[in-house]
Image (tube, helix red, strand yellow):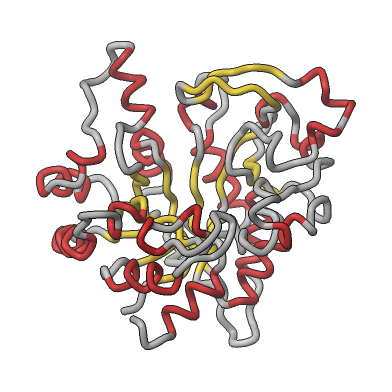
Amino acid sequence: MSAAVIAHRGASGHRPEHSLAAYLLASEQGADAVEPDVVLSKDGVPVIRHENEISGTTDIAQRPEFAARRRTRSVDGQLLTGWFTEDLTWEELSTLRAREPHPGLRPLSAAHDGEGAILRLRDVLAVCDRRRADGSRPGVVVEIKHAAHFAERGLDAVAAVADELAAAGWSDADDRLVIESFEPTALRRVAARMPPARRVLLLERTGVPWDLARQSAIGRGPAPLDSAAMLTDAGLDRLASEVAGISVDKAVLVGEGADGAGLVARAHDRGLLVYTWTLRPENVYLEDRHRRGPADGRGDWETEFAAVLATGVDGVFADHPDLALAVRRSALV
């Protein structure tokens, strides 16, 4: 079975990420699923942004009425300065406009800055509920962001997502639904709140999950395994008892010296799905051997995309779903 093509933050290579236009275009291009990142507003609304600090993806820095909300805050151990979703109500956030975070790299997307408002999870679910010309509907891979950070502020990201799915008429047993997170504790809460939901653990190339590291640091848990340990046979055995799948940095599959096909096969032997992120055509994102010309130009993305798909992964996240779909259809795979 060929890998699912999942539109990363919508068709975010063509339109500002997490905008309605990005999700509609992804659906039109035929993406098998879309991937919204969920953060929370001050009043607990599931808001679609890649990070809770939103100065780079909205026009908030140009909005004088919000100037006093700018602050410095630690998020998952990183000190950030800007504007945070948890400091604004949904009513306030809904007045903001989406912007391309990398205008120099993606000027055609940046040309659409300001055209779309911030979305809620229910808005993305509504796009997925629309039937396409062929009668199909895209699935949704919901990423819960910064759950531990929000919990420290009295906001429950898992409950907010569960309630929003239920309100939109989405069953947690829907085969079009996947819930993912970098935080194992969040996925354990998903298992308790939405037992049938397919849960996928996102893994950085190196390091340990922030939530587990934080628990260990304050004496509430053992020292966590790092990514390398989780991807050993013993680590995969443990993960198979906790989640339905893993989602890894593509460098783990096709980076220098990587044995992506071997990892995928070992995971599949244990019943685990394997996803990978993120397929992008620009040189700055490609492995060194596939770069051609300037950093902001496109390299040999076709070969890299084909190499990723050839590992046997179950799904790929792509900023340009049309390009990933074209490679999937081609003779390269």
Query: In the image, what residue occupies the spot 68% across and 35% down?
Result: 54
Instruction: Give how far across and how far down residue 291 sits, in percent.
Output: 44, 61
Q: Is residue 206 above or below residue 266?
A: above
Q: Is residue 272 above or below residue 148?
A: below
Q: In this rendering, does residue 20 appear at all?
A: no
> Taking 239 as reference, is 7 left or right?
right
Residue placed most toward the observer, 55 or 159: 55
Question: Which quarter shows the N terminus?
Answer: bottom left
Instruction: Give how far across and how far down residue 286 sits, in percent.
Output: 43, 58
> Taking 14 as reference, is 332 left or right?
left
Q: Is residue 25 above or below residue 230?
A: below
Give the residue at the far front of this rendering.
293
Instruction: Give how far across and how far down residue 226 sits, in percent.
Output: 24, 34
Query: In the image, what residue occupies the spot 31% across and 14% down?
Result: 217
Q: Is residue 237 above or below residue 44?
A: below
Instruction: Give how far across and how far down residue 257 sits, in percent.
Output: 20, 55
Query: In the image, what residue occupies the spot 77% across and 20% down?
Result: 69
The number of callouts visible is 0
Give the residue at the far right of this rendering.
64
Question: Which quarter shows the C terminus?
Answer: bottom left
Query: In the image, what residue occupies the spot 45% across and 70% down?
Result: 300
Give the residue at the far left of this rendering.
234
In the figure, residue 222 lies in which quadrant? top left
> Taking 48 as reference, is 239 left or right?
left
Q: In this rendering, does residue 330 appear at all?
A: yes
